[in-house]
Image (spheres, coloured by chain):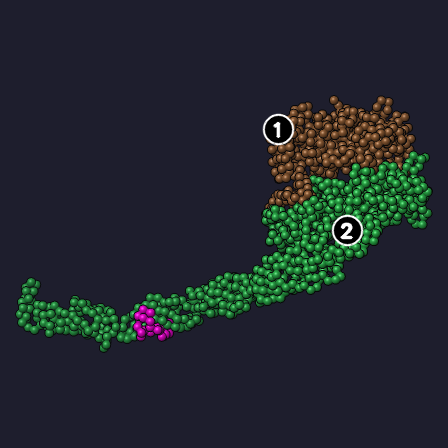
Chain colours: A green, B brown
Amino acid sequence: MLSRLALSLTLLCGLLQAQQVTITVSPTTATLRVNETRSFSATVRNTTNTAVHWTATAGTITAGGQFTAPSAIPAGGTVTVRATSVADQTKSATAMVTIQNARPTITSLAPSAVNTGLAYTLRIIGTNFLPTSTVTLEGRPATPRFLSSTELEVSAVAENAAGNSIDVIVSNPDPGASASNTRGLTVNAPVRVTISPTSTTIRGGATAKFNAFVSNTSVTTVDWFVNEIPGGNAIVGTVDSTGLYTAPGAPPSGRVEVKAVSRHDARGFAVATVTLQNPIPVLSSVTPTSAKTGTPAAPLVQLSPLNPTLSVAPQSGNTTTFTLTGSLFTPTSKVFLGALELPVTFVNGGQLRATAILTPVVGQLTTLRVVNPAPGGGESARLVVRVENAQELMSYGTAVRLLEQAGFGADPAAIAKVQAMGRGAWLASQFQAPVTPLPDALPPTGGGSQEGMGRLQTTWITNALTAPDQLRHRVAFALHSILVVSALDLPEHRQYVPYLRILHEGAFGNYRQLLERITLNPAMGRYLNMLNNAKANPARNTVANENYARELMQLFTIGLVELNPNGTPKTGNPASYDESHVSELAKVFTGWTSAPMNGEAPRFRAPDNWAEPMIPIEAEHDTTAKAILPGVTLPAGQMARQDLAAALDAIFNHPNVGPFVSYRLIQRLVTSNPSPAYVERVARVFNSNSRGVRGDLKEVVEAILTDSEAGTGPGAYTEMSADQGSLREPLALTLNLIRALDMRSNGGLASTINGVGQNLFHPGSVFSYFSPFSRPGPEFQALNATTAMNAVNLIYRLASNGLGNAAVLDLNPWDQLATNPDALISAAANALNRGLLSSNARAIILQAVNAQTSNRMKAITALYLVGSSPQVLVKR
Amino acid sequence: MALSSARRHAGLLANRRAFLRFGCQAVTGLGAAGALGQLGGINALAQTANTGYKALVCIFLFGGSDANDMLIPTDDAGYAAYSGVRRNIAIPRANLLQATSQGSSTYGLPPSMPGLHTLFQTGKAAVVSNVGMLVRPLTRAQYRANQQPVPSNLFSHSDQQQQWQTATPVGISQSGWAGRIADQVLPLNTPSLFPAAVSVNGNSIFLVGQQTQPSQIASPNINVNGQQNRPGDLERLNALQQILTLSSGVTLVQAAGSRINDSLVVLRQANDAFATLPNLTTPFPTTSIGNQLRQIVRLIQIRGAVGLQRQIFFCSQGGYDTHEDQPNRQPQLLADLSAAMLAFNLAMDELGLANQVTLFTESEFSRTFQPNASNGTDHAWGGHQFVTGGAVQSGFYGTYPSMILNGSDDSGSRGNWIPSISLDQYGATLAKWFGVPESGLATVFPNLANFPTADLGFFKT
């Protein structure tokens, strides 16, 4: 039945073909949003060809009727979709399509979070935005700026509290008004900034790096301020965008604040405190590098390493101005020359001027440095400056030589003084200098023993180091080394000091008077047995003691062999006298005893009286005739004093005495092996001074020290010839070094000096500390393995402050020089050896200095090695 | 000694000097010495009977010790002669310690010398009487008529000290007789670099030889300051030694530098050796002379460590110039001397070296037999010297002076005895025992041939 129906419909159509073609479109109306699609269908009747051709007034349509709305609403708001019959192109049908706005969507927000209370601009990213799109933020309309169909921008203030998000909705208007999805904008707490470190302390010119940490926002940029000044400035210091703070060179006192502010949220900031300290100054150059001391003002006072109030040299004129160049100088910068602070003018952070009248320095080299005070502060590097004496009538080296020959060494102030005065004036002042008194013995304590020699040694050493009468001390000690009384046999202060006083008082007097005072000194009397020396006593089978007679002639005046005027033995070594003369002379020295005390009557073998000269007891004096020297016979019957005077006159006038004494004094003061011509020149003065007087020690000493072989003349420093000079005796070595280094001393050096081979005032015998004939020089007699080691060790101890208060060295200036080993060694050589140092020795010392690991050990090493070098051990 | 041998020794000496100059390798050097020890055996001297160790020790009594009170006649006639001159400074006869005799004459020591007395009693001490400086044998008549050469500057301390040490009675010598002895036995000590001649108290020309350079080592603990094993310490020490040996061309500078450097080298060697010494049980008096002889014992103890077969030592005691108060002064000195001499001999017993070490005295002169007005005595001439040790044939040697003022033995009027034995003979006897060949004695003592015998016989044969 169904097939019959189909057949009948087919038939029906055929029947209708003859009718007009008709066309319909379905649907006939539609509403679409832009870009939406819809399918249309067309129905064609009365023809077999039902194909249609689709067109649209906007948008696109496929051959199959698939319509896509245009992307924008066309004029009039509608689009006509038309289907035209292919079979009959006059037949068509249309549909009316109304076009509406698209629905917006939000895909993201930028930023995704805002800070509460903070105005913000939000970029809304999504689709289908229209210039007419509207936005609501948490329900409140906001006016967006249309950027594109995918981007809107809207500004607002985040009023929501932190933790509540803001709902963001975009709406498109009619036709087809629609709203987007809702997107939540996170609301955070206000921006927070922290800084690290929160406080720091730096010196001027230094930098400090600060780091800022920004939270509650993704915008981490901060801006930096110093004391609220963006980026800071030259006064308060600067800070760059990375938080690197650079302190000003000359900082204001106290603190500055470095601040990091969130650029996103100015409410977010943090402050660090910077405590500014003074910078470490940088000293790069100084002019001049060599300067002169001030001019010593008259009258010149003796300068003392022991008494600093005296050692402030009176200086005037000759001002030196140093210009110091560098950086990080401050108005409070100080300038030091060695230990001396100089008045300073602050020019700017790169320049200072320091002005002073300079005083002499040890070793002529010192350091100039800039010191910035606390807080912070510090020292610059040290630049070496040479300080030379302003007035130089003598060369530096010659002045040192003279001070070593005519005193116990050369400290800087003494050198300046000698250079300023010149040899003649200085010697004249020395001859006039009053005798520095020696103390009386202290009363015996407790057990009744007498005071020993220790204090006298200490006092004498102190005087030798510091007393104004340097030359007198030197000559007195030389005379002591010739006219020997040893404390080995006279161990008490009260016994010894009157003897020493005679030498000091008589140092520039007449040798004849000195001989008499020494002869009658009770210590000498005890030592060489003239005290209580009785005349021969046949009943007891005794004769006069020969000791003093022998040594007076052999060691104090004439010697065993007749001498030429130049001190050399006469041909054939003829004896000056024989044993019989000794025995006969011994008789002269009989009858002498201690002077009476406490009003007692004089008597032979009286109680010891060390303070007064011996007196004669005529009954004990041998009154026989005495053939005391070849050709000299004292008549019988003379009183003791007559015999004494006649004998001393005869001995004093022996032609040997001039060359004999001159030779020994030259050895003690200048050189071990003087030329015969030198001896003769001095002996001639001994024999007859400028007024025709024999035995004037003052002129003899002057002749010795001003002889061409002494090398103390004006002009440039000259070396002594290679065979001249003398090994420094232990006393002189020790005192020379202490003075050269301007050390302080309590004088307690006797045991140290003894270890080096010289027991002060305790020579082993009447032959003194050394034989004048010992070769290669007298002082070598005391130099052996033990004393040599002790000498080297003495120098180490001096250099390293190993002798306690007996020798205190200020090593600070040497430490400062140690950063410049060459200058360090030069200064040591200047101080200890007149600047002389062979290039070989310098190289060796430099190597050893460089091997030290501290400035202190470098300083000690330089002083030790320069001081131990044989050139220094020998005085030349 | 053959010439070639001498030359070889000179070469070794040169090496020795070089070593001393650059002696930082002291320990290494000693090691080398040990390794080369065989070298010492190839010379003729070492192949004679001179095997084994020997040492000579001189005690010098400075000031001129009065020998008249060191050996006193105890027989009736002798004591009468003594006390007749000495009178109120004479030592009472009852106090004398009988020590030795010659024929019918007997002699005692002063009561201050019990230690030396013990050595006489145990057969370890001899005395050589009236020995002194002479050029050739001399009589009073010759002396007073100036018919014979005599030593220069008799009665002068310094000259006579020099002469006793140099065996050079006229003129100046640059060497001492002990130094020359050391030269003679140098082959026995080769190749040791340590000084064979050592003083423990001051410099002395006695020990200076032509080749022998003596040293002075006064105590066992002398070290360079500043050496604490810190960085730079060794460099400083090396620099010191380099500076000391730099050539300057300046006489005294050169002399000072080399002497100090030699000293440092020797002391370093000695200190290393001292550090390992065993204790000595023999007690020593803590007097100066006691301490000196104790130090010599140490130096003998290190003989093996420093490689020496022969050593010569010098020590001294001062204060003998007793012009005054001799009865109080001299006994104290002699007591110290005697006690120290005994201790030293006991120490040699302890070390088993009694027969190998001889201790002897010297003094520049004796003193006037006649006292002076100060209860003292003055400078004189010949005196008595003591020799002690296990090798010594105990007894009296020589001739005691006649004790007559203005007598045949008196050079003057006060008992200035003209020596009957010369220092040369005294020294040559010691030298021969020590190993100096007969042919070398004249080099050591140039005037020896002037005297009848070179061997006084005070050693056991």
Q: Amino acid at mark 1?
A: Leu
Residue drawn 66% across and 39% down? B262
Nearer-the-camera pick, A320 or A571 = A571
Magenta-span inclusion, residue A144: yes
Q: CA distance from mark 2 to mark 1?
A: 59 Å
How far from the left and from the top, in percent, is residue A184?
37, 67
Which element type, helix, strand or loop, lies under badge 1? Answer: helix
Direction from residue A413 to residue A324 in the image, left or right: left
Residue indicated by mark 1: B39
Would you place residue A212 above or below residue A866 in this image? below
- Residue A151 disc label: none
Would you place residue A225 above or below residue B92 in this image? below
Neighbor class of circle 2 (other Cα within 10 Å; few <14, some 14-19, many 20+) is many
Quadrant containing the N terminus of chain B in the rendered view: top right
Q: Amino acid at mark 2?
A: Ala
How far from the left and from the top, in percent, is residue A866?
65, 48
Direction from residue A83 to residue B76 in the image, left or right: right
How far from the left and from the top, in percent, is residue B133?
80, 32
Residue indicated by mark 2: A703
Quadrant containing the C terminus of chain B in the rendered view: top right
Magenta-span inclusion, residue B251: no
**How many numbered discs, if any?**
2
Report the chain holding disc 2. A
Highlighted magenta segment, given as a residue range: A129-151
Residue drawn 89% across and 40% down? A627
Nearer-the-camera pick, A69 or A816 = A816
Q: Is residue B223 visible?
A: no
How far from the left and from the top, in percent, is residue B242?
62, 43
